[in-house]
């Protein structure tokens, strides 16, 4: 029996007996608080969706990540962003599970901070200039972003990302909980197009969600990420960057 299986058996046994976790089972990854009240993004993001999305869906990814890394002491101190940026260094047997959970945790941590009830809801400054350069205009960018989000089949994310190679902005999608950091691209802005993000309010009309979402998009945060991406390799985020990921 592989070591990880016996460790998992032992952990489940402790759980079933009502015993506290052993020191090796301490939870390293934690659910971050929302940066606003659950009602703050009404009516664009309804309160029930926000509650479930944060306290159930995101919490489940955090729990799954703690569970997945618990068998590997060498990963115990690694941040979720490090795990994403260093996929090749993960144990083969656990790689898909760890990446899915770490992506779910990191992406949602980024996502909450990509929205705000206040502040700039349109780009400004250098980022606005870069969007005009790479997409023609902000309006053209929004149209493209919505179209790409609508076309994504199944569950995933749509991103405004900056390529490390030449600094250009691109709209990219990732399946499930993929993250552009794995492709040497910096996340600038992202929207969650899993059905759990919009189904209670919009049902099957993902396009309505994508169109309304601009009124809560946080371009102050996007500008901070854009400035950060000038000088930092995505892998450097691995050890934790409070600007980007308070909890991941
Ligand atoms: Mn989600």
Image (tube, rainbow, N blue to C red):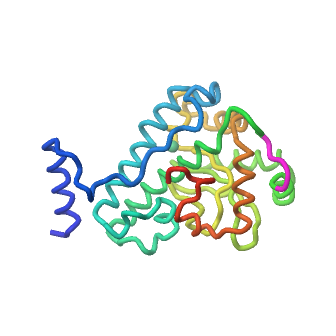
Magenta segment main secondary structure: loop
Q: Is residue 124 magenta?
A: yes
Where is residue 77 drawn, in percent x and y?
A: 40, 63
Left or right of 209? Residue 200 is: left
136 falls in the magenta region: no
Q: Residue at x 17, y 45 (%)?
A: 19
Quarter of the figure with the N terminus: bottom left
Residue under the point 64% across and 35% down: 209
Camera-side residue: 160 or 28?
28
Image position, residue 132 (x, y; %): 86, 54
At x 55%, y 66%, the residue is 182
Pinpoint residue 186: horizontal percent, then vertical percent: 65, 62
Relative to 36, 196 lies left or right: left
Q: Is residue 176 above or below residue 238?
A: above
Magenta-colored span: 122-126
Give the answer, above or below, for where 158 lies relative to 184: above
Residue at position x 46%, y 65% in the image: 83
Q: Specify whether 58 is left or right of 71.
A: right
């Amino acid at each position: 029996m592989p070591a990880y299986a016996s460790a998992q058996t032992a952990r489940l046994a402790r759980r079933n007996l009502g015993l506290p976790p052993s020191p090796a089972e301490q939870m390293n990854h934690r659910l971050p608080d929302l940066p606003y009240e659950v009602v703050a993004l009404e009516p664009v993001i309804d309160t029930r969706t926000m509650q479930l999305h944060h306290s159930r869906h995101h919490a489940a990814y955090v729990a799954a990540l703690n569970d997945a890394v618990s068998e590997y002491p060498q990963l115990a101190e690694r941040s979720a962003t490090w795990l994403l940026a260093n996929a090749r260094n993960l144990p083969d047997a656990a790689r898909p599970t760890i990446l899915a959970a770490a992506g779910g945790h990191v992406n949602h941590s980024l996502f909450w901070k990509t929205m705000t009830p206040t502040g700039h809801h349109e780009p400004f400054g250098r980022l606005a200039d870069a969007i005009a350069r790479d997409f023609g205009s902000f309006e053209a960018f929004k149209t493209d972003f919505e179209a790409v989000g609508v076309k994504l089949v199944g569950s995933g994310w749509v991103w405004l990302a900056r390529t490390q190679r030449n600094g250009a902005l691109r709209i990219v999608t990732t399946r499930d909980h993929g993250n552009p950091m794995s492709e040497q691209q910096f996340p600038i802005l992202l929207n969650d197009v899993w059905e759990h993000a919009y189904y209670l309010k919009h049902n099957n009309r993902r396009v309505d969600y994508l169109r309304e979402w601009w009124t809560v998009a946080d371009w102050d945060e996007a500008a901070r990420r854009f400035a950060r991406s000038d000088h930092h390799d995505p892998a450097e985020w691995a050890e934790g960057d409070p600007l980007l990921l308070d909890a991941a």
